[in-house]
Image (cartoon, rainbow, N blue to C red):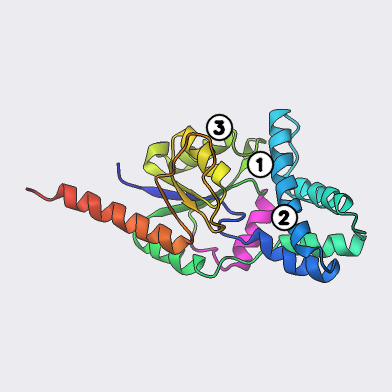
């Protein structure tokens, strides 16, 4: 079946969550990279725990909780000023440099584009605006609407519901392999933006395509379109 729409994860896929390490390094010399990594891991862990136990909190609050824990774990003195700086930076994470041109090209191909993210609406609106992506996306979807984080099926269902398409007609794109696996289990076609060169998770899921940047995604979509056109030509 042809790809009729593309749904993107936000954090790590469109916006560079680890870029916060530079600010963290200035605030905590020698500990910036460690803080950025632990903060991200704990943030995702908290979303899973809260979904499993039906104790939803907006992603902004989860992110702040994860920051406080991570600093305690690393024995860093997180002052209110440092906390505000780090959270403020998280609200305007930079987009990866190739993203906007690729998104514009995909939109010019007639693709419906959407974001489906754990981020709450205010976070996503701020990040999209800071990246100049306001005119690119048809929809910006937050799991806040269902009060369950990915990989809950209710979160992934937001895409088909708003786009009016079956999941198998939608390509789900994420840099997080666990997210790709969850989307694949749900029924999406999937593309893994494996920016870190990580191994595939041992979960019995293989993405339909993968690459290291969104530029590889554009090539995948073009190939899919060319193959369909070739099949449609009379013998």
Vertical relation: 214 (above or below) 156: below
* Residue that appears at 68% across and 48% down: 120
Vertical relation: 115 (above or below) 53: below
Tell which of 116 and 16 is nearer to you. Answer: 16
Q: What residue does disc 2 label?
A: 37
Callout 3: 10 Å neighbours few (<14), some, many (20+)?
A: some
Discs 3, 1 touching: Cβ within 8 Å: no
Asked whether, in this view, residue 209 is left or right of residue 88, the answer is left
Element assignment for label 3: helix
Tell which of 82 and 40 is nearer to you. Answer: 40
* Residue that appears at 32% across and 58% down: 222
Look at discs 2 and 3 and give the one toward the viewer.
2
Q: What residue does disc 1 label?
A: 144
Element assignment for label 2: helix
Q: Earlier in the sequence, mark 1 or mark 2?
A: 2
- Magenta residues span 120-136
Q: What residue does disc 3 label?
A: 153
Quote the CA–CA distance across marks 1 and 2. 24 Å
Q: Earlier in the sequence, mark 2 or mark 3?
A: 2
Q: In this view of the protein, can residue 112 be seen by the observer?
A: yes
Q: Which quadrant is home to the N terminus? A: top left
Quote the CA–CA distance across marks 2 and 3. 27 Å
Callout 1: 10 Å neighbours few (<14), some, many (20+)?
A: some
User: Where does residue 208 sit, x and y in percent of width and height?
Assistant: 39, 45
The question of residue 129 being in magenta is answered with: yes
* Residue that appears at 69% across and 36% down: 48
């Amino acid at each position: 079946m042809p790809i009729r729409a593309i749904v993107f994860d936000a954090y790590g896929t469109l916006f560079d969550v680890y870029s916060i390490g530079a600010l963290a390094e200035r605030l905590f010399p020698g500990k910036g990279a460690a803080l950025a990594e632990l903060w991200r891991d704990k943030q995702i862990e908290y979303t899973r725990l809260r979904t499993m136990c039906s104790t939803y909190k907006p992603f902004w609050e989860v992110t702040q909780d994860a920051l406080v824990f991570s600093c305690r774990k690393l024995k860093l003195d997180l002052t209110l000023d440092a906390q505000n700086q780090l959270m403020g930076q998280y609200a305007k994470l930079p987009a990866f440099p190739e993203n906007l041109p690729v998104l514009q090209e995909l939109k010019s191909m007639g693709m419906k584009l959407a974001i489906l993210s754990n981020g709450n609406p205010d976070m996503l609106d701020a990040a999209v605006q800071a990246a100049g992506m306001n005119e690119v996306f048809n929809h910006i979807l937050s799991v806040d609407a269902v009060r369950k984080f990915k990989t809950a099926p209710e979160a992934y269902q937001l895409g088909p519901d708003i786009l009016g398409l079956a999941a198998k007609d939608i390509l789900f794109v994420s840099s997080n392999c666990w997210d790709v696996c969850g989307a694949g289990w749900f029924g999406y076609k999937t593309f893994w933006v494996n920016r870190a060169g990580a191994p595939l998770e041992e979960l019995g899921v293989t993405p339909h395509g993968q690459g290291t940047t969104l530029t590889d995604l554009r090539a995948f979509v073009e190939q899919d379109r060319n193959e369909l056109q070739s099949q449609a030509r009379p013998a």
